[in-house]
Image (cartoon, rainbow, N blue to C red):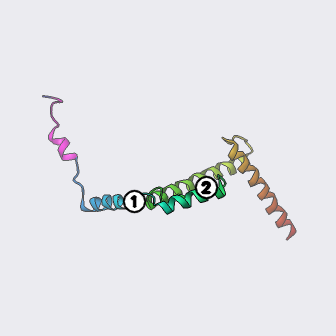
Amino acid sequence: MEGSAPSMKHFLSIQAVTEEQKHYKQSIITRRKYNGMTESMKENYMTHRKDHGNTREPLLVGLTSQFDLQLFRQAQARAIEDLVSLVILAVKTDTGSVPDARAKQLSQVFLLSEQRDDKALRAE
């Protein structure tokens, strides 16, 4: 009889979903609701893309829900903070073990800004 049916102990370990959890789940579903792009949004996107090409962030409004867009931007901000921390650590320890070319460029920018700060302090 082993393995044929879950034991009573298994059923007792499963917790019921609370009203608060149901409400939270429903609020997430509501916030993630996506209504699609309108024609004017598509035109604005194409105009922006033609004017700026790949030099700026594309218009992301209308591509997804505002909730998902906010999560995406928070994740981007966290990623750049982590990258900058890695660059600062590599520069300060002078290991040169920065993982990619973009990080190396950032480290050069960091060094230049540090040199400008030093010059400004000396001038005071």
- 58 displayed left or right of 102: left
Q: Position of residue 32 (x, y in %)?
A: 39, 58
- 16 displayed left or right of 46: left
Residue 72 inside the magenta-drawn segment: no
Of 15 and 71, the residue lying toward us: 71
Q: Which amino acid type is shown beneath numbered disc 2?
A: Arg
Residue 6's image quarter? top left
Residue occupying the point 83% across, 66% down = 120
Q: Mark 2 packing: few (<14 Cα in 10 Å), some, or many (20+)? A: some
Give yes or no for contact between labels 2 and 1 (Cβ–Cβ under 8 Å): no
- Quadrant containing the N terminus is top left
Q: Earlier in the sequence, mark 2 or mark 1?
A: 1
Q: Is residue 122 visible?
A: yes
User: Which residue is situated farthest in the top direction here?
Assistant: 1
Q: Position of residue 45 (x, y in %)?
A: 55, 58
Residue 10 inside the magenta-drawn segment: yes
Residue 95's image quarter? top right
User: Which residue is situated farthest in the right direction here?
Assistant: 123
Q: Position of residue 17 (x, y in %)?
A: 24, 55
- Quadrant containing the C terminus is bottom right
Measured Cα–Cα span from mark 2 to mark 1: 22 Å
User: Which residue is situated farthest in the bottom direction here?
Assistant: 124
Q: Which amino acid type is shown beneath numbered disc 1?
A: Asn
User: Where 38 falls versus 88 (above or below)?
Assistant: below
Of 51 and 55, the residue lying toward us: 51
Residue 35's disc number: 1
Q: Which residues are magenta?
A: 2-13
Residue occupying the point 16% across, 38% down = 7
Q: Which residue is mark 2?
A: 49
- 14 displayed left or right of 91: left
Residue occupying the point 75% across, 53% down = 109
